Structure formats: structure tokens, C-alpha cells
Amino acid sequence: MLTEVQILIAHIRAELQRLHRDDGGYSTEAVVVTAALVLLAIAVIAIIVTKVTQKANGINL
């Protein structure tokens, strides 16, 4: 009985160490690149909205 408990504890410790080493998904570089692309997209949309608004305000009826 004691041996089975020791084996179980060893497995749990090994799994905890593996989880601790695992980065859990996206790397820092991927997050930074994604954030930069989002900021670039927001800037492009702002420029387009400004130009369309200026063009619409320039229309004489």
C-alpha cells in the first residue's frame, strides 16, 4: 500500500513539474506581433474614416 502511494506521489510531482515548464500556449513574440497588427489595423481604420468624412463634408448639395 505504501509503495502505491509513493508511486502516485511521484507521478503527481512529475506532472506538476511538466506543467510548470510548459509555456501554456502563445509565445511572447506572437502576442507582441498580434498586438502590433491590431494597432496597425486601428490606425488604418482611423485614416479611412477621416478621409471618408472629409470627402462627405466636401459634397455640396
Image: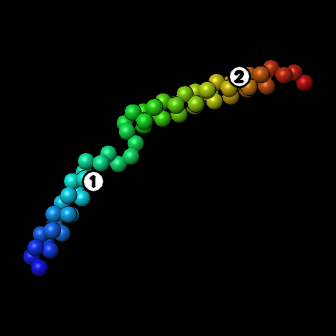
Residue 51 is tagged as 2
Q: Residue at x 30, y 48 (%)?
A: 22
Quarter of the rendering occupied by the N terminus: bottom left
Residue 41 screen position, x and y as percent: 58, 30
Amino acid tagged 1? Leu
Name the kind of residue labelled 2 in the image.
Answer: Lys
| Residue located at (87% from left, 21% from top) | 60
From the image, tell me which residue sits under label 1. 19
Q: How far apart are marks 2 and 1 (CA)?
A: 51 Å
Q: Could you tell me which residue is drawn at 79 percent across and 25 percent down?
A: 56
Instruction: Indicate the quadrant where residue 27 lies.
Output: top left
Check contact, mark 2 vs mark 1: CB within 8 A.
no
Q: Residue furthest bottom?
A: 1
For the view shown, which residue lies furthest in the right direction? 61
Residue 12 coordinates in the image, percent (x, y): 21, 63
The answer to whether 31 appears left or right of 56 in the picture is left
- Disc 2 on helix, strand or loop? helix
